[in-house]
Amino acid sequence: DSGVTQTPKHLITATGQRVTLRCSPRSGDLSVYWYQQSLDQGLQFLIQYYNGEERAKGNILERFSAQQFPDLHSELNLSSLELGDSALYFCASSASRATNEKLFFGSGTQLSVL
Amino acid sequence: GESVGLHLPTLSVQEGDNSIINCAYSNSASDYFIWYKQESGKGPQFIIDIRSNMDKRQGQRVTVLLNKTVKHLSLQIAATQPGDSAVYFCAEASYGGSQGNLIFGKGTKLSVKP
C-alpha cells in the first residue's frame, strides 16, 4: 500500500458529462501529481500541486482542471468528456516540491466514457 | 519533443533466470532516472533510481546500469520470481529542463514462466 488513496476506483459516464476524481496523498506529503495512462500514450503527466499551489503543468487539456485543498487532498475535474478521455487516471504524491522526486502512486481511477 | 523509449515491449523469462529490461533515452540533459514496476490493477511502484554521476546502483535483487555515452538504461532482476511479473517503466528527469517532471517510457511487460 503506497498510502495514496484515490476514489472512485471505477467511473462510467457518457460523453459531454463532467466528473471529479479525488486523491488523498500520503501523510505528510505536500506535492500531488496527476497522470493519465492510456494504451497508446503511456503515462502522461498532467499537473502538479504543491501545498495548495500549482507547481508544474504537463499535457493537460483545457477541459481538465485540478486543485489542491488546505487539507492537501486534490481533485481532478474532467469536463465535456469525450470518448478519448477514457483512461486510467493516477494520483501520486511526494514529500517535496521537486518535480523529479520519487513518487508514490495510488491505485488509480479507471474512467470509461461511453 | 524528447522522449524515453524502450527496446523491448515484452519479455518472457523462466523463473529463477535473470531478467534484463532495457530503456533508451534521448534527452542528454536528463540526470535522474527511475524504474517503476506496475502490477495489474495497481499504480506504478518505485523500484530503484540512479543519478547521472553514477553508472551502477544495486538494490535488493535489482541493479540499474546507466550508460550515458549511448543514453541507455537497464534494469537487471536477479533470480526472477513469479511476483516480478509486471510492466516496468523507466522514467527520466532533467533538473534544469523546461518540463522538470518525470517523463515515462512506454513500458516493458515482463512475464515469468514457472
Image (cartoon, coloured by chain):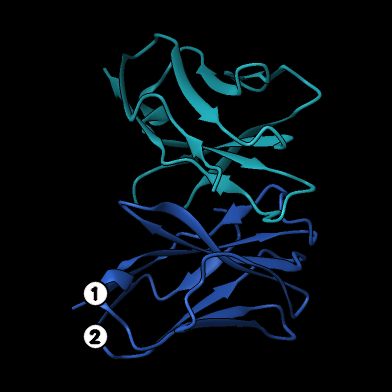
Residue at screen point 50% across, 27% down: B23
Question: Would you say the residues marked 2 and 1 are in contact, meaning their CB atoms lie under 8 Å apart?
Answer: yes
The residue that label 1 is drawn on is A83
In the image, is A103 to the left or to the right of B108? right
Residue at screen point 61% across, 60% down: A3
In the image, is A54 to the left or to the right of B36? right
Secondary element at tag 2: loop
Query: In the rendered view, would you say A66 is above or below A59?
Result: below
Secondary element at tag 1: helix
Colour chosen for chain A: blue
**Chain ID of residue with mark 2:** A
Residue at screen point 61% across, 65% down: A33
Q: Counting residues from the N terminus, which is met first, the one under dot 2 or under dot 1?
A: 2
The amino acid type of the residue labelled 2 equals: Thr
Quadrant of the rendering where the C terminus of chain B is positioned: top left
Chain letter matching colour cyan: B
